[in-house]
Amino acid sequence: MLNLLLQRECCVCEVMQALNISQTRASRNLGMLYNAGFVKQRREGLWAYYSIDKSLLDGYLASLLIALEIGLKDTSISLKDIESLRKAKRLGPLYCQKCQRGL
């Protein structure tokens, strides 16, 4: 997820599509990254968008982020995830509500 957020701001649906995971798993993990201080959250109504705010990272979080960027650079998994993110679409909260109800 951090690899995706290093590329750009993402909503939950984009993370779901890019990583082929459930809405619950995407939301839960984005929430953990937010609580840990790695990402910031921007809200539009009920919808949340996540991004990495490098200016808010303190010493050790900034160091971990740099190490992550170096470790992921040009790896096959990283490149695959980035390509999947390019194909992902912001579907909006209505889509996720339908997903949760199984429609």
Image: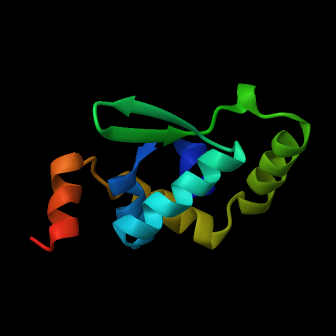
For image coordinates 41% across by 73% down, the residue present is 21
Total count of labels: 0
Which quarter of the rendering shows the C terminus? bottom left
Measuring from the top left, give residue 96's x and y in whole percent: 23, 57
> Which residue appears farthest toward the top when viewing the image?
55
Q: How is the image coloured?
A: rainbow
Residue 51 horizontal side relative to residue 19, left or right: right
- Which residue is more in the foreground, 100 or 1? 100
Residue 9, visible in the rendered structure: no
Measuring from the top left, give residue 31's x and y in whole percent: 54, 53
For image coordinates 15% across by 74% down, the residue present is 102
Residue 8 horizontal side relative to residue 58, left or right: left
For image coordinates 45% across by 31% down, the residue present is 42
Measuring from the top left, give residue 29's x and y in whole percent: 55, 61
Residue 27, visible in the rendered structure: yes
Residue 84 horizontal side relative to residue 102, left or right: right
55 lies above or below 13: above
59 lies above or below 85: above
Which quarter of the rendering shows the N terminus? bottom right
> Which residue appears farthest toward the left when viewing the image?
103
Measuring from the top left, give residue 23's x and y in whole percent: 35, 65
81 lies above or below 47: below
